[in-house]
Image (cartoon, grey):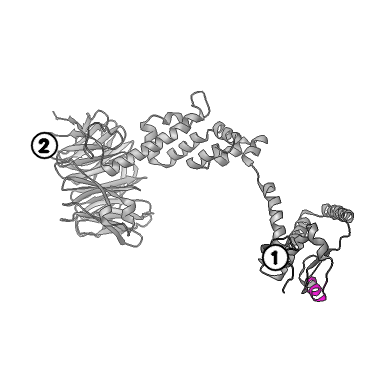
C-alpha cells in the first residue's frame, strides 16, 4: 500500500510509520496521530472503501476506524466526547473491581495482547518502578532485620562493599548485622588457609562469639578483611618465588644415620630414626622432648593422632604407643619382613611390607587390634599404601599401582599421586583412579623420587638427589599446560637423600639421610638482605646421651 501523506501534512517522524515491519504495525503507529491536533482534521476529510475493509480485519480495536486509500489516511474514534469516555472508563473500572484476581489478570492480558509495541513501551515504563522493591530497607521497617541480614550474608566481599554504598539503611543493616565478621567466619570454616592464618595471627579469638563487649565493632572486621587478603597473596608469592625462612633440627647420635619418617602438628614433630628410636620435638623451641625406644630395627613409618602413635619398623613389627606417656600399648606381629608404610583412620588400619603383602586391621581400641584380611598380588615389596572410604591404593617395587576394593568395606578416591619408587625412576605420575589413565608425568628430579604429597593447589616431591620440588597441581591437571610450567620451585638444602616430607599452606617439613629435619616456613619470611629462595637458618642440634 502506497501512502500519499506528505512530510508537510504529517508531523509524525517517517521512521515511526515507514519503519514498521507490517501493515498492522503501521496502522498501530498511525493511530498515534489522533493525539496530534494539527493532523486530526486533515484525516477526517478523506475516506476509502478498500482500506476500510482492510482495517476492519487487521485493527485490534473495534472502536477505531483507520482507512488507507491512494489519498490521505483517515483515522477517527467512535468515542464522541471526553465526557462519555470518562463514564465508560468508570463503568469498566467498577466491573473490573468486581472480578476475581485471576479474571482481572486474564482480562489485562487480553487487553495488552491487543495493543501495539508503542503502547507496550508506555505500559512497561509505568510498571517498572512499581515492580522495584527495596526489600532490604522494607524488612527492618516490619521488624524483620534478621531476614535482611541473612540475605546479605550470602554476598562475597566485593558485593558486600557495593551493598554498603547503596544507601545508609543498607549500610546500617550490614554494620549492625556484623556481616563482615560473618564473612570472615565463613571463610575460616571452609578454607584451611584462612583457618591457619586466624590461629597464627591471633584474630581467631574475635570470631564465633555472640555480641558481647569483647567483640570489636563491624568496622574492625571490615578493615581486617583486606589485611587477610594481603597476607594470602604474600604467602602465595612466597611459594611461587621460593622465599622461606629455614629452621634445621640436627638429630645426630652415635648410631643414627638418617631420619626415615615424620609427622607434625602446631606443637610437635614426631620422627622415626634409623637408630631404632622415635623422637618427639617441640616445634617452637626445636628441643627434643622425649625418646621412645623398643623397636629392634629402624623406624620406617609412623602416624599419630591425639591418643596414640603407631610405628612400623624393619624388625617387621607394628607398635602402638601412648602419646603423652610414651608407653607401649600393643605390638602387632604379622609381616615376615620390614613394615614399609602404614595408615589408620576411623577404626581401620592398613600396613604394607617388604614381604609383598598388605594387611587390613580392625582397630577397636589401641589394645584391641585384630587382623581382618591380607591382600596379595604385588610381585615385589609394597612401598606405600593409602585408603579412603572406597579404595585401598598401593604402589610397589614391581612398577605397578594397584587399586583394591575390599568386600564389606567401602572406599573412595579419584585423583591419586604416588611416587614411582622402582629403582632408577626419577619422575612421578598423576593418575585418574576411576579410568586408570595417567594424566601427567612430572619430570625434573635427577634421582629416585622417594616421597610425595599433594593438596588442592600443589604437589611437593622429595628425591634421592637431595632436592624438594614444588609443582602446580592445577597446571598438571590441564593437558594444555606445557611441561616447563609445572615446577614452581626447586628447594635444595639437604645434603643427603630426602626420605619423607609433609606440608600445609604455610610450610614444608622434610627429613633426610643427612640426619636433619628441615622446616621451610613460607609465612614468616624476613626480606632484609636476603636473596630469593634462600634464608638464614636457625639450627638446633640434639646429641643423645
Tell me what residue is drawn at x 25 percent, y 28 percent: 285
For disc 1, the neighbor class at 10 Å (few under 14, some 14 to 19, many from 20) is some
Is 341 within the magenta? no
- 165 lies left or right of 512: right
Tell me what residue is drawn at x 78 percent, y 57 percent: 36
Residue 255 tag number = 2
| Residue that mark 1 sits on | 17
Q: Quadrant of the N terminus?
A: bottom right
- Mark 2–mark 1 Cα distance, whole angstroms, equals 101 Å
In the foreground, 279 or 323: 279
Q: Quadrant of the C terminus?
A: top left
Please state the horizontal and vertical placement of residue 531, each as a whole percent of the image.
21, 37
Question: Which portion, as a residue range, is magenta?
Answer: 47-55
Sequence-wise first label, 2 or 1:
1
| Element under disc 1 | helix
Res 207 seen here: no
- 545 lies left or right of 326: left
Res 69 seen here: yes
Tell me what residue is drawn at x 38 percent, y 32 percent: 199
Amino acid at each position: 500500500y502506497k501512502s500519499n501523506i506528505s512530510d508537510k501534512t504529517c508531523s509524525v517522524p517517517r521512521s515511526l510509520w515507514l519503519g514498521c515491519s507490517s501493515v498492522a504495525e503501521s496502522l498501530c503507529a498511525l493511530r498515534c496521530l489522533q493525539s496530534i491536533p494539527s493532523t486530526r482534521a486533515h484525516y477526517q476529510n478523506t475516506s476509502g472503501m478498500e482500506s476500510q475493509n482492510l482495517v476492519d480485519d487487521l485493527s485490534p480495536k473495534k472502536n477505531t476506524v483507520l482507512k488507507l486509500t491512494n489519498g490521505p489516511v483517515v483515522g477517527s474514534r467512535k468515542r464522541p466526547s471526553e465526557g462519555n469516555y470518562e463514564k465508560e472508563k468508570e463503568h469498566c473500572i467498577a466491573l473490573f473491581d468486581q472480578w476475581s484476581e485471576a479474571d482481572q489478570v486474564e482480562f489485562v492480558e487480553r487487553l495488552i495482547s491487543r495493543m501495539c509495541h508503542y503502547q507496550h513501551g508506555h505500559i512497561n515504563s509505568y510498571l517498572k518502578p512499581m515492580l522495584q522493591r527495596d526489600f532490604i530497607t522494607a524488612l527492618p521497617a516490619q521488624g524483620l532485620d534478621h531476614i535482611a541480614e541473612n540475605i546479605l550474608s550470602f554476598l562475597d566481599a566485593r558485593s558486600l562493599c557495593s551493598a554498603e554504598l547503596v544507601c545508609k539503611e543498607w549500610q546500617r543493616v550490614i554494620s549492625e548485622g556484623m556481616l563482615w565478621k560473618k564473612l570472615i567466619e565463613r571463610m575460616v570454616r571452609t578454607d584451611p588457609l584462612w583457618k591457619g592464618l586466624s590461629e597464627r595471627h591471633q584474630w581467631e579469638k574475635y570470631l564465633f562469639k555472640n555480641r558481647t563487649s569483647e567483640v570489636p565493632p563491624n568496622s574492625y572486621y571490615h578493615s581486617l578483611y583486606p589485611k587477610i587478603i594481603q597476607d594470602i597473596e604474600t604467602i602465595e608469592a612466597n611459594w611461587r618465588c621460593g622465599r622461606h625462612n629455614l629452621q634445621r633440627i640436627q638429630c645426630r647420635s652415635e648410631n643414627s644415620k638418617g631420619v626415615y619418617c615424620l609427622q607434625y602438628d602446631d606443637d610437635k614433630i614426631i620422627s622415626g630414626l634409623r637408630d631404632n628410636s622415635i623422637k618427639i620435638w617441640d616445634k617452637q623451641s626445636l628441643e627434643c622432648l622425649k625418646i621412645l625406644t623398643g623397636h629392634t630395627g629402624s623406624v620406617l613409618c609412623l602416624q599419630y593422632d591425639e591418643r596414640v602413635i603407631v610405628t612400623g619398623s624393619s624388625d617387621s613389627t607394628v607398635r602402638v604407643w601412648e602419646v603423652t606417656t610414651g608407653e607401649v600399648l600393643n605390638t602387632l606381629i604379622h609381616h615376615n619382613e620390614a613394615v614399609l608404610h602404614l595408615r589408620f583412620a576411623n577404626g581401620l588400619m592398613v600396613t604394607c611390607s617388604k614381604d609383598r603383602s598388605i594387611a587390613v586391621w580392625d582397630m577397636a581400641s589401641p589394645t584391641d587390634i585384630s587382623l581382618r584380611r591380607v591382600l596379595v598380588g604385588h610381585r615385589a615389596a609394597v612401598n606405600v599404601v593409602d585408603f579412603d572410604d572406597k579404595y585401598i591404593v598401593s604402589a610397589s617395587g614391581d612398577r605397578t599401582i594397584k587399586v583394591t576394593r575390599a568386600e564389606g568395606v567401602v572406599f573412595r578416591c579419584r585423583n591419586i599421586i604416588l611416587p614411582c619408587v622402582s629403582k632408577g625412576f626419577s619422575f612421578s605420575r598423576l593418575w585418574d583412579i576411576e579410568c586408570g589413565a595417567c594424566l601427567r608425568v612430572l619430570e625434573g628430579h635427577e634421582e629416585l623420587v622417594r616421597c610425595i604429597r599433594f593438596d588442592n593447589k600443589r604437589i611437593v616431591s622429595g628425591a634421592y638427589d637431595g632436592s624438594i620440588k614444588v609443582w602446580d597441581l592445577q597446571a598438571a591437571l590441564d593437558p594444555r599446560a606445557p611441561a616447563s610450567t609445572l615446577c614452581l620451585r626447586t628447594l635444595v638444602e639437604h645434603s643427603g637423600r630426602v626420605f619423607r616430607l609433609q606440608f600445609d599452606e604455610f610450610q614444608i617439613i622434610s627429613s633426610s639421610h643427612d640426619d636433619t629435619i628441615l622446616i621451610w616456613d613460607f609465612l614468616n619470611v624476613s626480606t632484609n638482605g636476603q636473596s630469593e629462595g634462600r634464608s638464614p637458618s636457625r639450627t638446633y642440634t640434639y646429641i643423645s646421651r
